[in-house]
Amino acid sequence: MLNHIEMFLRDLRSATRSLGRAKGLSLAVVLTLALGIGANAAMFSLVRGVLLRPLVNRDESKLIYIRQSANGGNAWFSVPEIQDIEARSKTLTNFGDFSVIGFTLLGLGEPRTVQAGVVGGSYFQTMGLRPVLGRLLDSHDDGPNAAGAVVLTYRFWSTALNRDPSVIGKTVRLGSFIDTRTATVVGVLEPCVPYPQDTEIISNIVTSAHHLSATMVTGRIHRMTELFARLAPGATLEQSRVELDSIYKSMKGEHPVDYPSRTDFEISATRLRDELTSGARTILLVLMAASVLVFVIACCNVANLILARTVRRESELAVRAALGASTLDLRRLLLAESVLLCSAGAILGLVVAGPLLNVLGQYASRFSLRALDLTMDSSMLWVGAGLAVLAAALLAFVPRLPSSGATQGLGLAAASTRMTGGTNRKLKAFALVQIAACFVLVAASAATVKTLLSLETVRERFETRHVLAVNVPVMRDGRGPAQLVAYYQEAMRQIRQQPGVQNVALTTAVPWRDRDNEFALEFSTDGRVPGPDEKRPASTGQVVSPGFFTTLGLPILAGRDFNDADRADSEPVALVSQSLADQMFPNGNAVNHHILWTDPILKFIPGPPPVPRRIVGVVPDIDIRDFVPRPTMTIYHPMAQDPSNMGGRLLADVSSDPYALVQPITRIMRKLYADQPVERARTLEDIRTEVLSPERLNAVISAVFAVVSLLIAIVGVAGVLAFSVSARTREFGIRLAVGSQPRDILMRVIAEGTAMAVGGLLVGLICGFGLGKLAAAFMGDLKMPGMAPLVGAALILLISAVTASAMPALRAARVDVIQALRTE
């Protein structure tokens, strides 16, 4: 053993001297490997940190997320449903409930809106979480007589409050859409992934008047709560799924009216970690596959360089074989060289992987907050070492070696550079693999770029550059509906008087920013009652002030807009979108027909019951969700007639700099009401850009992978052809001597490069579709690229291959005939 180690150390010293004489090749190999190893080490750390790293939750493998869905979307749970499941389940224990709600938070610096969770006292025990300051909520915080209590998430405490320890014990005011209540900050949650991921505070049920209402407690269809549980000792996830299906069938049988067949209610259970990472899984696995392809391309490129160098060294290796070196001795020498190159590549790759991990972590944080807490650890070192060993083995065992018993050993020592058919096939095979892998990456990148361009080029139907959107959430604080309407009307009157302001309006939802708050409710027209199994029409609803459509630069298509005469004591009226008018009324003539909200969920929403409203106008569709506008069913109420559902979104059409209006708006709103939050001021154009940023990042990341792989592949094709030209100098000289034209040689070499590219494209197309179908079976939201990206990627690669072939081809066409014939 010691003898082998000594021999290998001697080979390392010899390899160091040999590589020192080939500095250009060594540098190319190290840089190429560093790129492949660094990208894969960073991606593995990202995937491990987001998808594989254990949660901080105690016994997280037993923590289950239970989902109820209707028509494929999340339907959440009602209190009676949770009570039924909890009472009947034997495989699940320690249930915890979580309701998402928006609060206006007062008492911790500037007034602000926060994303909150309202939970029962068992929530934190079920989740297995601990505090870093103070305490968490428990059973003592349950019930309508408990004191209001708030727990801050660690991220909110760190970013918004600068980790202020004195926050414990402070009294805050939480404003909801019903009233404002006080609560005490009792603790700070440990660093974890809260559910959902943008939660900032978690409070007990008494802080929300809506959660204490009788309809919330007794209404089976009042679904707004998410449900967690733990597997009972000895129970498995599959057993819990079977039991939940049985319980759910019983529930639907006992309450058929609450589970109509047309809504396709279902129940499912999954581990919490899978639920938390579901949004990031597809994109991370796709990026991981891309980084693996980059590594494959890098290894193929390096293998070609080493193969070419080995051919040039055949005379040296033949002499070693003739002097008694065995195949094992020669292979060990090549292994020593490969180890040096791959070790240097791995070290440089790990240096690159650190900052690359930070960039990828910021990118992936849009899909999972776990990506923000990534750090370099030993796993990255092991990945780098493993990839280096894999590459070293490939580089050491790919080249063909002369045998010490070969009779031509000394002859080879004197011969010029020759390339055997086997070596030529290996070189072309590695180049073909590079092109195939590169084609997959370029096609994927072209698909993401095409998607982005299609979104960027869509022209909106309404004004975006000069319309400022500001969140001014409703703060009831003891004020009645009439007082709230008067407050916003006076604020808008004063804002209109500011220089450059053309129009001001209030609305429920800002396009794109409030895209996740959109939900549809059932309605009827002119008193028509659908049959029991007939599909009910559904529409989204918005409450807007007069001038809303003028502010967006949209016309009234039929009838009239809302005006100041549409008061609480006047006839109930509504506006409808064009798609709703076209679908529900002959020839779209909706004016003077009546419309009525009929959705059963409305009986749980505070305020007077719905009444028939006369349609006074038809307006253009406004799609607040998608950038490519789709037909939208929307019903609009005037603000003065529906103050209980005002959304507190202010829009201002400004002829000058919109952002210059932010300070005047803040001053006016807080002069009229000192605790009014005024936040998130952005033009609609900037909101669009902000919401589009994930698509831009997708395009940038995929384009970087594609460009890097394309550059490596181009170098690989050019390298193979350059070496082929060098090895065939005599052949080209003879062809020119017997009458071939230089352009014939030029086209012959270019055709050879083009043939390699076409072969690689075919292999890439077949393998890409095969891998895509396989991946789609595990990742249902993965889409195959269309024809345009595939054709575009093929053209890019063909043009690149022809360009890469040009330099070796020109060199071949300029071969000196006399010199070529003297090479032997």
Image: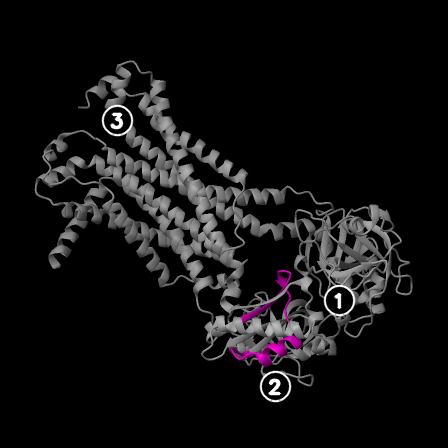
Question: Is 363 drawn above or below residue 430 in the view shown?
Answer: below
Kind of residue indicated by mark 1? Val
| Residue at image mark 3 | 728
Single out the residue that lies furthest toward the left: 323
Q: Seen in the image, is 490 located left or right of residue 743? A: right
Kind of residue indicated by mark 3? Arg
| Residue at image mark 2 | 140
State which quarter of the image contains the C terminus.
top left
Upstream in sequence: badge 3 or badge 1: 1
Q: Quote the CA–CA distance across marks 3 and 1.
A: 81 Å
Q: Which residues are magenta?
A: 65-94
Question: Is 303 drawn above or below residue 529 in the view shown?
Answer: above
Q: Secondary structure at mark 1?
A: loop
In this orientation, does residue 556 appear? no
Residue 293 placed where, x, y %? 40, 47
| Residue at image mark 1 | 474
Viewer-nearest residue: 405 or 555: 405
Q: Quote the CA–CA distance across marks 3 and 2.
A: 87 Å
Residue 96 placed where, x, y %? 58, 76
Q: Secondary structure at mark 3?
A: loop
Foreground mark, 1 or 2? 2
Name the mark on residue 280. Answer: none
Residue 782 placed where, x, y %? 52, 51
Question: Is 49 drawn above or below residue 452 in the view shown?
Answer: below
Count of labels in the image: 3
